[in-house]
Image (cartoon, helix red, strand yellow):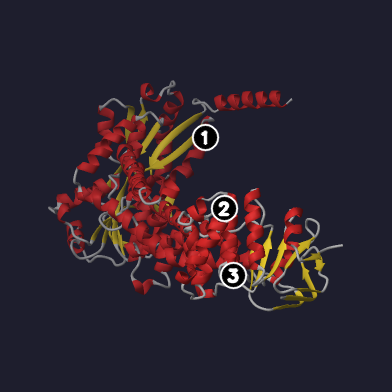
């Protein structure tokens, strides 16, 4: 009696496992910043309803996201690091890529910085104010380093005022909030966390291209991922369609628009 | 000597009452009774380890040697002199006596070995010597023949007979031959 | 990937990269000092609970055993909230001191609890024997500590192992700040979330290796444990 019960359980489990196979589901790896903004939670149900394909989101740092793409652990990448993305495509890991929206980075901190330009802002911070860096090779981190370098700073020479946390945007911003420090963040994460922070906008300039944060979608090549890539293709097309891009453009956090479609 | 008057011990499940008695000085009293009748409990009460009703009058300090004794993590010798040390007595003065007893009980070779490494019987003997070396007025022995071979039991008989000249000895033992050989008095516990 | 990790581990160790050495050193210093600091109060409390006869002893034991299982991340949260809140003036937020404090609180019940679990019965019997031989209170304390030495040793080893292996508390109260509060476990967590699995595995191997070395060294001194 027990033996046949066990056998039945084994067969059922196998059946269920196989039923959950790819084809019914699209795995999307995205960065913690995008996940924090809440956009995906908002728009993905539309996809699932329209196409009957389930989605699964995994949020990690940009580095891990690209790595997972390389390992074929996901169907789709939603990231915002053009340099790494290009490398990914050049090396043949990605089948399709499209940049669709952007938002901006801004500096948050306890007080608004009396700065007219980004150069001024960084100048006020350097050597003076406690600044938290992501320090985790993420897209935001890469941008932060790029900005320091652009204005001629030598990062290796930074003293104790510069603190590398090696963690995600949420954690890093929390640390800044807790200790009245400054940090560079993407607008999405900032808006999502605004209510719980003790810090606010210290410097922003949505017009400054240096602070623009470009989001792209990549479909991982089916050779790497396995399977026929059909569901992933459907998702890619849906995500890049005018209707969806519009929906993304209309998405608001705390009353503010967050993503700006490239065409605008 | 030990005098019992209206003594009883209360456990959660039962209450053991003991007949009034006078355990004589310089004598060996064997406590008899069935398993679980309260013999060990009586020893513990006399030894002051558990609470009891009634009066227990004692002529001095009472020490108990337990059936499964706990020896300290040190040499046999150091175990034996422990009760002397805590009383501030100089162990050197007792060296001769310790050697004599050790020889009597066949422990002489083991004196400087760690007590944890002894056989069960040797541990028993060490505990007994530890209990007697400081000359307590009252000696309570709980199943002292456990683990002892025939020779050792004979040695124990000799020791007990020697010691009773100085102490009140009360013991519990299931070895009938031993009891008959050493008992001056018998006290029965239970119905 | 494991062989890549092994190679990276070796490279890291001989690289003379001060950052790596600093991380290893900080892990050791914080966990070791927390364990040693908690040693005396932990052992004393463990012994007191073992031999004590008082009302509410059962509740105390239940609370003690429960605290042994406090998730490190919860302890981290508690200490972080203290540091941000009432203890603000002490400037402890994201500091090594806070990490030490969090681990101290973590291992204290582990030391006391393991002593109770492993040696309560032994202690009661040792105490009983001492009493029947005429020992007074001042003798008993020393005797108990002597007779429970192996259990004390074991509880300290256990505590240290837990401390150096945990990531929840040190991450929350320390913040994994490079050069300041980054330790082996937070380093591993960080690198994993960054996708640098090779580096993570490498540090993981180093962590295991450090634990191995410690036990190897100790085995020279404690034949009763290691044979």
Residue that badge 3 annotates: C131
Looking at the image, the residue that sits furthest to the left is: A152
Q: Nearer the viewer, residue C160 or A59?
A: C160
Residue at the image position 50 percent from the left and 55 percent from the top = B108
Circle 2 marks a residue in which chain? B
Residue that badge 1 annotates: A48
Circle 3 marks a residue in which chain? C
Q: CA distance from mark 2 to mark 1?
A: 80 Å
Q: Is residue A15 placed above or below C15 in the rendered structure?
A: above
Rendered location of residue B35, percent (x, y): 78, 55
Circle 1 marks a residue in which chain? A
Q: Residues within 10 Å of mark 3 (few under 14, many from 20)?
A: some
- Secondary structure beneath label 1: helix
* Tag count: 3
Q: CA distance from mark 3 to mark 1?
A: 76 Å
Q: Is residue A94 placed above or below C60 in the rendered structure?
A: above
Q: Nearer the viewer, residue A44 or A3?
A: A3
Q: Is residue A157 left or right of residue C90?
A: left
- Secondary structure beneath label 2: helix
Q: Are marks 3 and 1 in contact (CB under 8 Å)?
A: no
Residue that badge 2 annotates: B122
Rendered location of residue A237, percent (x, y): 41, 29
- Circles 2 and 1 on the same chain: no
Rendered location of residue B100, percent (x, y): 53, 62
Q: Is residue B89 left or right of residue C221?
A: right
Q: Is residue A82 visible?
A: no
Q: Nearer the viewer, residue C52 or B70?
A: B70
Rendered location of residue B94, percent (x, y): 49, 69
Residue at the image position 32 percent from the left and 33 percent from the top = A98
């Amino acid at each position: 009696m027990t033996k046949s019960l066990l056998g039945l359980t084994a067969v059922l489990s196998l059946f269920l496992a196989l039923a959950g196979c790819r084809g019914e589901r699209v795995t999307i790896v995205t960065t913690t910043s995008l996940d924090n903004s809440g956009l995906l939670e908002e728009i993905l149900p539309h996809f699932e309803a329209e196409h009957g394909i389930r989605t699964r989101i995994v949020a990690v740092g940009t580095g891990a996201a690209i790595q997972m793409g390389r390992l074929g652990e996901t169907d789709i990448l939603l990231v915002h690091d053009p340099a790494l993305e290009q490398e990914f495509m050049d090396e043949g890991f990605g089948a399709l890529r499209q940049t669709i929206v952007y938002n901006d980075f801004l500096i948050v901190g306890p007080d608004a910085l009396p700065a007219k330009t980004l150069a001024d802002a960084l100048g006020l911070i350097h050597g003076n104010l406690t600044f938290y860096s992501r320090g985790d090779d993420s897209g935001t981190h890469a941008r932060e380093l790029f900005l320091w370098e652009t204005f001629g700073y030598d990062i290796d020479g930074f003293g104790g005022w510069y603190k590398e946390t090696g963690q995600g945007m949420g954690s890093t911003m929390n640390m800044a909030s807790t200790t009245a420090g400054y940090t560079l963040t993407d607008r999405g994460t900032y808006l999502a966390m605004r209510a719980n922070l003790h810090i606010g906008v210290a410097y922003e300039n949505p017009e400054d291209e240096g602070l623009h944060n470009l989001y792209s979608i990549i479909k991982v090549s089916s050779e790497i991922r396995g399977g026929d890539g059909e569901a992933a293709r459907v998702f890619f097309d849906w995500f890049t369609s005018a209707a969806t891009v519009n929906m993304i453009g209309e998405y608001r956090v705390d009353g503010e628009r967050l993503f700006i479609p490239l065409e605008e | 000597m030990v005098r019992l008057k209206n003594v009883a011990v209360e456990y959660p499940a039962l209450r053991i009452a003991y007949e009034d008695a006078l355990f004589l000085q310089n004598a060996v009293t064997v406590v008899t009774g069935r398993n679980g009748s309260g013999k060990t409990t009586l020893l513990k009460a006399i030894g002051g380890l558990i609470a009891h009703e009634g009066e227990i009058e004692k002529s001095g300090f009472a020490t108990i040697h337990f059936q499964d004794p706990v020896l300290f993590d040190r040499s046999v010798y150091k175990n034996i002199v422990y009760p002397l040390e805590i009383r501030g007595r100089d162990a050197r003065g007792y060296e001769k006596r310790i050697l004599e007893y050790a020889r009597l009980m066949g422990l002489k070779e083991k004196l400087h070995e760690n007590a944890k490494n002894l056989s069960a019987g040797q541990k028993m003997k060490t505990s007994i010597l530890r209990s007697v070396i400081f000359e307590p007025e009252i000696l309570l022995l709980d199943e002292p023949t456990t683990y002892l071979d025939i020779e050792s039991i004979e040695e124990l008989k000799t020791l007990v007979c020697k010691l009773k000249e100085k102490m009140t000895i009360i013991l519990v033992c299931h070895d009938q031959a031993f009891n008959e050989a050493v008992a001056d008095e018998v006290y029965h516990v239970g119905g | 990937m494991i062989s890549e990790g092994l190679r990276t581990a070796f490279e890291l160790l001989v690289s003379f990269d001060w950052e790596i050495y600093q991380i290893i050193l900080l892990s050791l210093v914080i966990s070791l000092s927390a364990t040693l600091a908690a040693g005396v109060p932990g052992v004393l409390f463990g012994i007191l609970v073992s031999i004590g006869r008082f009302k509410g002893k059962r509740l105390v034991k239940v609370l003690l055993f429960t605290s042994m299982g406090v998730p490190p991340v919860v302890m981290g949260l508690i200490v972080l909230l203290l540091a941000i809140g009432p203890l603000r003036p002490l400037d402890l937020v994201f500091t090594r001191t806070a990490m030490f404090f969090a681990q101290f609180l973590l291992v204290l019940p582990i030391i006391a609890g393991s002593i109770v679990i492993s040696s309560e019965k032994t202690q009661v019997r040792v105490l009983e024997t001492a009493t029947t031989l005429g020992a007074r209170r001042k003798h008993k304390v020393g005797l108990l500590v002597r007779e429970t030495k192996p259990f004390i040793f074991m509880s300290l080893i256990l505590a240290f192992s837990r401390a150096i292996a945990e990531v929840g508390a040190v991450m929350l109260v320390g913040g994994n700040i490079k050069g300041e509060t980054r330790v082996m476990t937070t380093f591993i967590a960080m690198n994993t979330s960054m996708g640098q699995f090779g580096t993570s595995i490498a540090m993981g191997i180093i962590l295991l290796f450090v634990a191995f070395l410690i036990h190897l060294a100790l085995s020279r001194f404690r034949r009763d444990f290691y044979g």
